[in-house]
């Protein structure tokens, strides 16, 4: 087996994607913490930190394009780099959604708590777990695990529907003065559900990486 | 996978004396397609290519088993007319090898040895062949100049024109662009895409990206065996065998 410098570069790309994934998971976690604790300063930090994530996304893109140009990869190497680029884009979108949640946290920070938050932290745990699991599937080239994430997305849709239904029926419909706060929480649920969608898209990429089988648009 | 085969290779073995260079090769070549043959040095890919127009017959101790069917005829049968076979199956080599003659005479050569004497026909065929090889515009005003005055890329296209002049069905190319610079290489590759509309092309190449760019089908040989044969887009994104993946990604040492 030839010891290729290219393998080291692919490993470097892998590590960069893992770092990107860690940064985005941290953003989701902190954004929900900011919502839970009505912590404006924490929310502002997340918004500020997103610039760093955006720059890192561009760095990964540049590195990938350079590998494509210089190495002209084929077969598994080609699938790894092209999938890595897609995952990078999905992670960046996830980080943007964490920023959206942070904005909702700022909206809510100077208002009294509408209700004790139960389902939203559960939903946040689910979304972080989906992102973590999909990245585990990527690292271990595990198509079975990737498929589990795709299944988990159904749970995310149900949870969003439950939270939004409760906000509309128990708060907005009964007392219009809750509208602004309920709407913010309604949007938080929407953003969390979109995060889960992006975790699902990453898993579709992992399935392609492992098996060269395209499952996009089939779930 | 292959709907309209022009060549069918069946249980084909080739020996140099006692040494078996190709083992049980079975493959069908699609008409009007480009088939790339890849594999490490000594894997038998050039031996396979040269078997298709019996070029290996010139080697002492060369021996064939099995069949190579072309137009319903087994070409490795002893009664085959080799001159007629090589008219049908033209060949272009790694290093351009024009004769020390004029551009005109280089292309006319194959016609003359095939007994064609009609000057108008020869002139017409030369123009068509040079056009077919995308060289006409560059040489039409100096057909009597020496072939050696041409650049390396032009000489290789002249050799292609020479092969086209006798109106073959199949063109065998043994690393036709390996000695050329990127611009001349691109010209040859674009020419191959044009030529496949009229001819069936089989090309040996060491350059994976070239195989990926020009071929419709790819055959991977190793140690005299055809390991994998598939559509090029599948071969280079998702090869079936690990050994193919290791070879095309440069992990094979």
Image: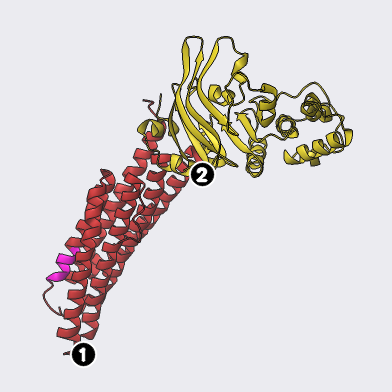
Chain colours: A red, B yellow
Residue B39 seen by the camera: no
Q: Name the residue under label 2.
A: B3
Image label count:
2
Within-10-Å neighbours for mark 2: few <14, some 14–19, many 20+: few
Label 1 sits on residue: A176
Task: Name the mark nearer the viewer: 2 or 1.
Answer: 2
Tell me residue B218's x, y (percent).
50, 36
Counting from the top left corner in percent of width and height, residue B104 is at: 83, 30
Q: Distance between the residues labelled 2 and 1?
A: 70 Å
> Is residue A3 something that shows in the picture?
yes
Q: Is residue A81 left or right of residue B118?
A: left
Image x and y of residue B114, in percent? 77, 26
The stretch of residues the image draws in magenta is A118-124
The residue closer to the viewer here, A215 or A93, is: A215
| Residue at image point 21% right, 81% down | A182
- Residue A26's place in the image compared with B203, above or below, is below
Do discs 2 and 1 share a chain? Answer: no
In this rendering, would A60 be left or right of B166?
Answer: left
Q: Mark 1: few, some, or many residues within 10 Å (few <14, many ≥20)? A: few
**Is B24 placed left or right of B135 in the picture?**
left
Q: In this view, does A165 lie above or below B45?
A: below
The quarter of the displayed image where residue B179 is located: top right
Image coordinates of residue A146 in percent, x first then y, are 25, 52
Q: Is residue A199 magenta?
A: no
Characterize the magenta stretch by its predominant secondary structure. helix
For numbered disc 2, what is the local secondary structure?
loop
């Amino acid at each position: 087996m030839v010891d290729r410098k290219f393998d080291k570069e692919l490993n470097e790309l892998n590590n960069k994607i893992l770092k990107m994934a860690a940064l985005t998971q941290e953003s989701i976690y902190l954004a929900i913490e900011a919502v839970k604790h009505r912590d404006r300063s924490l929310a502002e930090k997340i918004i500020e930190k997103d610039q760093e994530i955006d720059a890192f996304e561009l760095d990964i893109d540049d590195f990938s394009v350079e590998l494509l140009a210089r190495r002209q990869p084929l077969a598994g190497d080609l699938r790894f780099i092209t999938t890595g680029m897609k995952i990078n884009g999905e992670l960046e979108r996830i980080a943007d959604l964490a920023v959206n949640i942070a904005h909702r946290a700022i909206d809510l920070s100077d208002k009294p708590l509408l209700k004790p938050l139960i389902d939203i932290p559960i939903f946040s745990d689910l979304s972080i777990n989906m992102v973590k699991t999909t990245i585990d599937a990527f690292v271990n080239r595990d198509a079975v695990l990737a498929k589990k994430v795709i299944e988990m997305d159904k749970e995310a849709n149900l949870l969003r529907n439950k939270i939004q239904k409760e906000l509309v029926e128990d708060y907005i419909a009964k007392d219009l003065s809750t509208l602004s706060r309920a709407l913010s929480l309604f949007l938080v649920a929407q953003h969390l559900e979109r995060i889960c969608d992006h975790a699902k898209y990453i898993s579709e990429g992992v399935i392609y990486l492992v098996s060269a089988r395209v499952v996009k648009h089939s779930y | 996978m292959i709907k309209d085969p022009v060549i069918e290779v069946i249980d084909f073995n080739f020996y140099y004396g006692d040494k078996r260079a190709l083992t049980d090769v079975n493959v069908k070549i699609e008409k009007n397609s480009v088939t790339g043959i890849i594999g490490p040095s000594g894997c038998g890919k050039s031996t396979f290519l040269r078997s298709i127009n019996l070029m290996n017959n010139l080697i002492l101790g060369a021996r064939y088993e099995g069949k190579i069917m072309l137009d319903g005829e087994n070409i490795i049968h002893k009664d085959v007319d080799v001159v007629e076979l090589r008219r049908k199956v033209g060949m272009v080599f790694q290093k351009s090898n024009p004769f020390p003659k004029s551009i005109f005479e280089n292309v006319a050569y194959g016609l003359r040895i095939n007994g064609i004497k009609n000057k108008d026909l020869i002139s017409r065929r030369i123009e068509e062949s040079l056009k077919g090889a995308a060289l006409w515009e560059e040489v039409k005003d100096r057909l009597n100049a020496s072939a050696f005055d041409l650049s390396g890329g032009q000489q290789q296209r002249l050799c292609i024109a020479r092969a086209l002049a006798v109106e073959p069905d199949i063109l065998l190319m043994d690393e036709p662009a390996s000695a050329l610079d990127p611009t001349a290489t691109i010209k040859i590759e674009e020419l191959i895409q044009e030529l496949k509309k009229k001819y069936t092309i089989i090309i040996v190449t060491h350059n994976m990206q070239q195989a990926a760019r020009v071929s419709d089908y790819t055959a991977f040989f190793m140690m005299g065996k055809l390991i994998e044969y598939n559509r090029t887009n599948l071969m280079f994104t998702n090869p079936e065998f690990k050994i193919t993946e290791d070879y095309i990604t440069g992990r094979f040492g």
